[in-house]
Structures are given as structure tokens and as C-alpha cells.
Image (tube, rainbow, N blue to C red):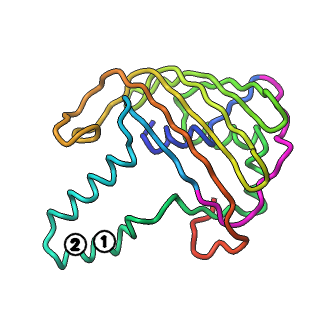
Amino acid sequence: MTLQRLLLLGSLAIVPTLQAENLSTTPTPGLWINESTTLINGIDMQARMREMRTNMLNSLPPEQRAMAEEMLGSEGQVGERQCITADAAKTLTDPEALLRDAKENMPNCDLKITQSSADTLQFTGRCNDPDGFTGDMNGTIEMISSTEMRSTFNGQGAYSLPAGLLSQDAGASNGDVTLSHQQVSRWQSSDCGNAPTY
């Protein structure tokens, strides 16, 4: 399981083993902004990615740097933009539909779900991916309102980390990791503009 797929776990990976009902609140279709914080062994991955981006850009000649900045977008942009269609909004409340996404994206994870309220799902489970994360996990998905969603994910286990990820001088490792991911998603507008569609 790649790091990107692991982070999707906080908002997508649900394997219902008990009969979980659909969440009672449906997200409003349109443009959503996702703001997240991911810590690996206490290190803020978003801050680390910004640092790596800056270091990469600083190493380029001025003309290549300008082209790279145009391709990478503005560093000051807050959050990830995402367009949620009416069909996708229904999917985000349906544990069975989320199960299909989870199986496709994370075939090496086995998760169990409980429903603590009409708008909150909780999950626990284990991943066993020889090329990625192996360990235990837990988290929640919560519909605060039709215009705000929150998710959390915590994991304890081992993960194959590429060289330079945790710090500039860090080598590649397969060591123990503690993962913590929190995401808040808020509706912005009915007009998605050019945002990617979920």
C-alpha cells in the first residue's frame, strides 16, 4: 500500500462486518476543500513535502524553476480541491460502496466497522503489505453537517520509507512507524470550476 493510498484510508477504507446503515447526512454536491495533517513518527509530512519542494526548486536553473513552479502550482494554495458530484455524495454515505473502493485501493487491508451514531463510522483493522504498511489501525469518519466532513486515522506498525522522507539526511528504512492523519473537508461552492472530480 502506497503512502497516498494509506492516507486515503481516513476517508475511504471501510469494510463492514456488521450491518452499518447509511450515514444520515449527505454531503452537498459541489466544490470541497480538504485540509489534512499527516504525522509519521511525529514529523509533519505536509511541512516535509513543502521543504522537499523548495529544495528541489532551488536546485534548478531560473528558466527550469519557472516551468516547474507552473506545473506544480502555487505553494500558497491551502487544501486540496475536489469536486463531489451528486452520485458521489450518495456514495460517501453508503458503507457498501465505500467497501468497494477500499477493496480496490487497499487489497492488503482487512478492516472492521462499527457505527457509533447516525453520522459517525469507526473502523479498526490490520494491513499486511510487504511493499508498504504492515500494522494495526483505527479511525473515524464523521459527517458534521452537509457542508463539513471529518476523518481521523491512526496506525502503528512497520512501513517502507524512502530515503529523505523523514529528513533530508534520512536513509530508506523499514522501521517501526506511528501514523496519525486528520482531515477536515468543507463545502465551498456549487461551482466546481476545474477541480478534479471524486
Residue under numbered circle 1 = 69
Can you say whether 10 is above or below 130 in the image?
below
Marks 1 and 2: CB-CB under 8 Å? yes
Q: CA distance from mark 1 to mark 2?
A: 6 Å
The answer to whether 111 appears left or right of 159 in the picture is right
Q: Secondary structure at mark 2?
A: helix
Residue type of the residue flagged with mark 2? Arg
Query: Residue visible at 32% across and 46% down?
Result: 48
Q: Is residue 161 magenta?
A: no
Determine which quarter of the picture holds residue 100.
Answer: top right
Q: Give coordinates of residue 62: x percent, y percent.
A: 16, 76
Query: Residue visible at 82% across and 31% down?
Result: 117
The answer to whether 66 appears left or right of 78 in the picture is left
Q: Magenta stretch: give its range.
A: 18-33
Q: Secondary structure at mark 1?
A: helix
Query: Residue visible at 78% across and 62% down?
Result: 86
Query: Residue visible at 42% across and 40% down?
Result: 3
The quadrant of the rendering that contains the C terminus is: bottom right
Disc 1: CA contacts within 10 A as few (<14), some (14-19) or many (>=20)? some
Q: Give coordinates of residue 93: x percent, y percent.
A: 78, 45
Residue under numbered circle 2 = 65
Determine which quarter of the picture holds residue 173.
Answer: top left
Residue type of the residue flagged with mark 1? Glu
